[in-house]
Amino acid sequence: MVNTLSHLGVGILIATVAGLEGRQKKIVAFLAILPDLDFFTDALLVLIGGSFSHQTYVQLYYLMGHREFIHSPLFILLITFVIWIYGRDIKFAAAGFAALFSHFYLDYATTWKMRPLYPFSVESSIMGAFDSFDPVVMFVSLVPIYFLVAEILKRKGVIRKIPGGQLESTPDKTIRVDRILLIVLILWCVITPVSKGFLVNHVSDIEGYDISYQNSYPNFFGTFLSAYPYNQTHYKVLEMNYWTGIEKSMFVPFISGDDDSDSLEYVQLATELYNSAPFQEIDYIVYNVSSNEETVIVKLQDARNPFAIFWTYFRTEYIFEFNRDGEGYTAYVKRETIYLEEAPENWFWVPYYPMYINFFF
């Protein structure tokens, strides 16, 4: 699983291959998990974010949100520069850069959108080459953790000998286990994006539509969910994998629910509000509209959400409850299709439109 423990294992592996010991090895291992400290800045933003204007909140989110600035190449370069200034050691600085970059790459290659060009661009993107439970990444990252724990137990006298020898080599000193693991990881990180590209192109040829590489997300090992506008009323959602091509497909309407004369106006307003937020989890928006004499409720989610299995980020609904009397709206966010909470007012903002004047004045 690509999580903080996985990143730590890769950091230890990089430090071991670089031949670092003692303090330098610990620092490189720490650098591999450093970007995940934005969990704390993200939590802080949750606590204080409601007191800022919408524009200020958006900029703070780009800086403090999870997998935002602290997961960017610019941050990697800044920290690498600090390491170089601190130690004036090329090998140490290179290992630190590799540890930080491995964290960025592994997150970018799984199922979480990031802003790799921030602050020069706030466009979010994702590679999505393998899922968060990728067996190769999991194995490679956990082996160094195993040797670390075994070494600690040996020093404490719990065990007399480390089963499997040493991470650096086998007992006969002929094979460097650490180098083999790192080579396997690098090859896997190169092969998987390329193989995904071949699969997406193959499915595009079958469908007669240019399927988006970026918007084809790994659902589980070797399987991806994608979608595209099939006609003026429906998306076609595809589940595809390396073994069978298109495994299954289904059609999802753009809009469902009530179909009164006001629906499209509220759908447009809900879209403008959603687009003003910095999160942008949804690629293929579908709307569900319900109404009564007093309110109109518009729900936004991704067309693929009902078919996602292990997504931790993209299974999200935004719910806007509009008052027909023009006295405003209430917004809610539903994470993992389970946890419903009211969204802070400064998450959303929409520019002036004459048809929406009663919502804001």
Image (cartoon, rainbow, N blue to C red):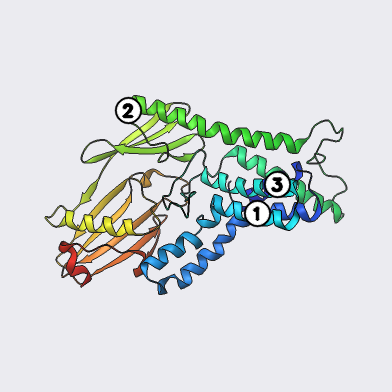
Of 209 and 151, nearer the camera is: 209
| Residue 343 makes an appearance in the image | no
Q: Which mark is residue 95?
A: 3
Cα distance, mark 3 to mark 2? Answer: 44 Å
Q: Position of residue 332 (x, y in %)?
A: 34, 64
Relative to 215, is 323 on the left or the right?
left
Amino acid at dot 2:
Glu
> How many C-alpha atoms fall within 10 Å of the one at disc 3: few (<14), some, or many (≥20)?
many
Relative to 161, is 128 on the left or the right?
left
Q: Position of residue 195 (x, y in %)?
A: 50, 29
Q: Which mark is residue 12?
A: none
Residue under pointer 2: 207
Q: Earlier along the polypeptide chain: callout 3 or callout 2?
A: 3
**Residue depicted at x 66% and y 34%:** 184
**Residue depicted at x 74% and y 49%:** 92
Q: Examine the rendered structure and indicate whether residue 124 appears above or below residue 360.
A: above
Q: Examine the rendered structure and indicate whether residue 317 appears above or below residue 174.
A: below
**Disc 3 on helix, strand or loop?**
helix
Q: Examine the rendered structure and indicate whether residue 18 appears above or below residue 361.
A: above
Q: Nearer the viewer, mark 3 or mark 1?
A: 1
Relative to 138, is 323 on the left or the right?
left
Residue 234, picture quadrant: top left
Q: Nearer the viewer, mark 3 or mark 2?
A: 3
Residue 31, picture quadrant: bottom right
Cα distance, mark 1 to mark 2? Answer: 48 Å
Cα distance, mark 3 to mark 1? Answer: 12 Å
Q: Nearer the viewer, mark 1 or mark 2?
A: 1
Amino acid at dot 3:
Ala
Q: Are marks 3 and 2 in contact (CB under 8 Å)?
A: no
